[in-house]
Amino acid sequence: MDESGAAVDETVSAISSGLPEVAKDMRMLAALMEDSSGEKLIDATKKLCFAFSDLLNAAEPGTKEPRQNLLSAAGRVGDASRYLLNTIDEGDESQELLLALAKGVANSAAKLVVQAKQCSATVEEPQERETIIQAAAQAALSASELVACAKVVAPTIQNEKCRSELMGATRKVAQSVDGVLSSCNSSSADKGLKGDLQAAAREVSDALNRLLDQIRPVPRVSAHENLQEGAVDTILVATDKIMTSDDSSDMVKQARILAQATAQLIQAIKGEAEKTPDSELQRKLIAAAKVLAEATSKLVEAAKSCASNPQASGSQDLLRQAAVDLREATNMAAGGALQRKSLRRLESSAKNAAAAAAQCIASSQSAAAICDNPTTKDAMSSDCRAVADTIPKLVSAVKSSLQTSDESSQLTLIEATERFLTPSLSLVSTTKNASSFLVDPNASRHLSQCSQKLAVELVELRTALERMKADSGIAQPAKQLETAEYKVREAKEEVIAARKAAVRHELRPLPGDTPQNAIQRLTVSIRKVATCTEQLVDSVGNNDSGQGISAAQGMSSGLSDLIQASRAVAATSGDPMRVLTATEEVLERSSKLLKESGGLLSTPSITPEEKEKEVVPLGRGVQESLLKLQNSIPGQKEVEEAIQSISFTSLSMDRMGQRPRPTKNYGQLQNELQQLATEVDESGVEVVGALGNPQKLGQEAFAFGDKTKKLVERGSELASLHEEVQMREEILLTLKNMCIASSNLLVVAKAISSNPDAPGAKNQLNAAARAVSESLNQLIDACSSAAPGQKECENAVRRIQALKGLLENPSEPINNCSYFDCQQIVVEKSKLLGDSMTGIANHAKEGRLAEFGKSVNSSADAVCGLIESSAQAAYLLGASDPTSVAGRPGLVDIHSINQSAAAIKTACQTLHNSKVTQPQVLSSATLIAQHTSALCTACRTASERTNDPTTKRQFVQMAKEVANATTALVRDIKALDHEESAEKLENVSRATSSLTRSVNSLVQYSSQPEFSAVSAKISNKGRETQEPIVTAGRSVIQGSSFMLQAAKTLAVNPKDPPTWQQLAQHSKHVSDSIKRLVTALREKAPGQKECEMAVDRITELLNQLNQASLSAVSQNLVPRKENTLRGFVENAENSVRTAEEGVERLRHAGRSEAEQLGHEVSSMVSRMEALVANILGVSSNILQTKEQVNILERSKTVLESAHQFIMAAKETGGNPKAISLHQELDLSAQCFQEGLDDLKSSLERISSGAGGFVGSITESIAASMVKLDQQKRSFSPSGGNEGYVDFQTRMVNSAKEIAKLSQDMVSKSTVDPTQLPALSSDVSRLYIQLANDARGAVATTISHENGVRIRCGVQELGRALIDLVRCGGSVQFSPNDAFAQRDLSDANRGVSEKVSEILAALQAGSRGTQACINAASTVSGIIGDLDTTIMFATAGTLHAEGDETFADHRENIIRTAKALVEDTKTLVAGAASTQEQLALAANSAVSTIVQLSEAVKFGAASLGSNNPESQVMLINAVRDVAGALYDLIHSTKSAAGKPTSHPSMLQLKESAKDSLLLEGRRRWRLRMRVGSLVHQTRMKKS
């Protein structure tokens, strides 16, 4: 029982936040129970609440009650917990057994206490007698604590932390028993009593062992399987050590261990084969054992070679390769053992993560009551609901896996884990941000700790998930898809049950189901199933089993969500049968598709064309059923009917010749057309405004479709009056474009009505409405015969009025412009508008109506650009408010993709028209080329940003499809341009259809929520900040519209003075509005106000520190008692840590993200406030005045540098173009970081003295683990100039140093435990550096699998280091505790194993680099050998063996020299290639230089010892070549993986030029010398 104030506060906060959630859940569960079970559950819950109340009363700091009362209260909590779980049938008989065993320990301890008292009675020395009594009392108290702890943790003994607590209590009992024995043996001389005491102690030990056997988790595998897993673990560790070692003796030692382990594994596999009745399985097991035996034999031979020749790098390479082969054979032979181990780890991680998530949710909901930021509170509540929805499925999947462990349950567990991870990561981020808005510091710390704990558990869960996926990746596609199809058939029963309930009118919505929420969930599910269906069809056609399995699992998951959502829609709508029937059809067709796809993927004999022919209709059937389900959503049917009506009306224009001639004249039809155009425009606005009400949306969509139909009819009649064919075709074309725009508006409205929170929804809808206005303008232009200038003014007014929606509640980004870009655009557009206004007046006065029309169009363009930038600036300004929740960028820019897709579709519609003109064809083709290029660029960017291989591959594939479709379309257009025919028109039509399908697929895939950006949630205060800009923008729209209306009148009557007066007034109104807008943009720059407030607040905090410093110097600093010194230090270290995390974010915001500046500055100030409060507490509880002043001075340095940092950020203001100020910002950030480092070192020194180093160091390690898991998509390591090799080199050094320090901790634990805090601090510092470098290594490695391996390895090392530091803390406080010493030794062993795994992963990712290192070593040996040969030649002792002449070696030397030049070129090129290619190039170059050196040595020897000068000259030539190659290999190693612009790559190019030139010269010099030597030899012989 820890009496630390911080620990008590944390525990109380956890109880107070978690208990209300338990009560709420139990109340809901009781309401669903029948008979009297609900009442029993409520009664059990009440008892639990009363028990916790008694526990809190007993634990109150000021209470005078004995400790036994606290233990009794804790025991009652355990009893109440067990009773509650038994009430809901979650109890377990093992709990009763555990309690019985704990009580057995207590009874045995009681007998020991009696024996000890009897011994004490025989002792005459009072002090010794008192020592025995105290030891006996401690034993009794430890036994009581054990029983109390067992009662509390028995219901949750499967939890690792609960087991750890109980095992700690057993350890205390064992220590107290040792204390009793020691005191009695040294004091009592009665051998009989001592014997009885020893017997009682043995009885206690036996009882403890029985209890420990019950505490330890029971393995779900047989001893035979455990033997397999033990051998596999040994093989994995030993192979890692061989692959990372450079010591031949150590490698041979590990090979010996490997041979023993593989022998055990082979025997286990053979034993399993003998027992199995399945002959096929028996054959596979025997074959696996044979493969493993062969790999072992090769390993033994390689080890013998390495042992006989330890200095040869080639022997080491052979042994490493043999170890790799053996590892692969082990994975194949013992796949089941590996998979079982991964499964158990995933189950354990899932349980721990679910528990941490539940605790975080409870803490969040408790903290919501004291959160002073409503926007953050709403975001936290939303994330809590999202996570809470996934926890039951995860827990259910874990239970199912524990019970069956078949492949279906494993897939269900994997799927549930993936669904749990995404919202949980969001909850971690939200709660971390919310902790700074809590007014209660204890609640804030508890929420922060819960968030951190959840983040760490998610790291472990994700690592376990990826290991499980890697180990279970051997499953057959047919089996995987069969499992997915079986789950779909199971889910169909739920729909049937819901349909029966609907027939009986008993279908009720579940808690939390609302019409809008249900529709939104159903729409998201439909989109996900549609995307996965398309991927599954493509994968079957391409015979891609991996993608097919992934798509099938995603489809199964999406259908599960679809069923729940469709039930909710049916329960909240008036026509449930329609939705449920459509859902049943979706499931039926999806089941058939999955079944057939599994068979096709498992049948390689069927050609891809046949597979595609069979699977495409099935996929189309699923898509059609999904569309039918979409249309069954309330309000969707009416919208769909309106869309169909518009499409039918558009098609009816082709039958215009069959209509009778209109009775009205051209002028009448023109007036009606203009009136209808206005009505359609207004009706479109009504459609946009009805999105929140599905029923109203259906009505407005019907009205919009009806008015559009009338407009088309009038336009067709007007076109029929034109005698000129070209004019008639132009009007019909604009009518069709208007129908397309109108239909697109309804399509967008239909999609957004069912998913209003979709990213970019508002912008997409506004763009669709503006497209309708633009198409109406084009129609009016084509049909109007009014006076010049009239239609331009009307069109301009419509365009401007269509912008009103942008300023209605700006809550989404309009484009990618920064705030300062918007400011600049507004100024530029203001100038353009001023010039246009002047032009309007001048041209109207002079009667130049053509120029007048151009000025009107120019003014409309200026106003549109000005309003768009104003809306974007307003969004950024609202998002920058600290009370708003900041958004985050997405993987793709969905707004740009939608814009490009809309432009492509419009151009394709134009090309579809059989009467399209040649200029329109060229214009449409150009537009398509531009926008398809933009789409391909977006796909490439997305594939580069993501680390998921499936997503990367999908984006690349979609980009290829779009590019291929575009190429085909351009080819057909060119063919049509050369010769127009019906066949070529049909080819163009097919090509446009293909392109449209590809683009639609891309848009659908990109629209998934996980890819899209998340817009900021603007708070009420943020909206108030937006108001000046929004108001000025609206005023500009109103004034410019009135101004253009007046200009329209002037165009007809330029001599009317009142109209001129109106024009002047409206122009002035526009000018004044623009001035207000520009002023608001300049004065309301994001983050400026927050920076000023932050500077003032930091000044106040500095004054507080100055006052405290003066008090410390005068020794009048009053100690603060609201916390202990340890608690203050831990809180201060946490504040420093969070401040360090914010340094880079604030610097980045100050450089280029003005909208984030306010958030980061406010967050930094809140951290500084918490830091100062805790520093004052730390300094006031330190006894030495010098130490007080030191910590206060360092804190003042931090605040002063923070002041300078914020001032620099205020000056830059987030403006990326203020480059001259960025250097000062970077410098101030660096100074601030250095100040934090100094303060942190002081706090660590104080922490080690206060006994709090464990908590602070483990939190630092955990934070680094979490940061590594939050890998940024756009990670740019160290300015982008470092490659994988740089990160690898530093990581290897850090990992080896960590292993060394870990071993030092074990050695110092017995000699000088006081050094453990310093060693732990050094370990933490190195791990933080290792984790940071790991992020760079993961981002720069070519292999995704290797990146995952590195990340998982570093995170697992973090877990091991946390255990190491905790064990070190236990040893420091109990240096003589043998259990603690053993735990520390075990933790060190775990650290060593994880370091080996990291080194192996790093080496696996740099085969080429390692080959260069080995090659350089080999070349260095060659150079040394050549130097030795030169010594022999100089001494005249270099002789040839046999009767040889130099001519025998001449051709071989020249040929090898030429090959070396080619190998050198390949080596240089390998620096920019893959690691595999670089390894091949390095090995080839080394092999060639070895051959060349041997050839030259034999050639020199053939010259004879009587010609030493020629021998030395020849050997020196090849030595120079080897030296140049040695330098080139080093340059290649340094440049490997670097970008072409990196200095190392440039240095390599220069080195390569010199090297190639040198080798060329050497080669020709060699030829000349060879010729000369041959001539000399012949002369001597003659």
Image (cartoon, helix red, strand yellow):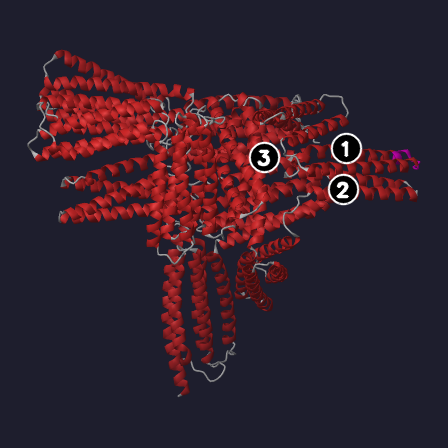
Counting residues from the N terminus, which is met first, the one under dot 2 or under dot 3?
A: 2
Task: Work out whether mark 3 precedes mark 1 in sequence or the reverse, and give the earlier one.
Answer: 1
Mark pair 3, 1: CA separation: 28 Å
Which residue is under mark 2?
208
Q: Amino acid at mark 3?
A: Ala
Q: Amino acid at mark 1?
A: Ser
Q: Which residues are magenta?
A: 122-129
For label 3, the SS is helix
- Who comes first in sequence, dot 1 or dot 2? 1
Q: Residues within 10 Å of mark 2 (few under 14, many from 20)?
A: many
Residue at the spot of label 1: 144
**Residue 528 seen in the figure:** no
Please state which of residues 1538 and 903 is positioned toward the viewer in this rendering: 903
Residue ranking furthest to the bottom: 1582
For the residue pair 1328 and 9, the one nearer the viewer reads as 9
Please name the amino acid that badge 2 sits on.
Answer: Leu
Mark 1 element type: helix
CA separation in Å, label 2 and label 3 = 28 Å
Residue that protrudes farthest toward the top in the picture? 1058
Quarter of the figure that contains the C terminus: bottom left
The residue sitting at 19% across, 20% down in the picture is 1044
Q: Is residue 971 magenta?
A: no
Residue topped by disc 3: 355
In this picture, residue 520 sits left or right of residue 193: left
Say whether residue 414 is left or right of residue 907: right
Q: Quadrant of residue 1328?
A: top right
Task: Name the secondary structure under disc 2.
Answer: helix
Q: Is residue 1441 visible?
A: yes
Q: What residue do we see at 46% from left, 48% from top?
A: 482
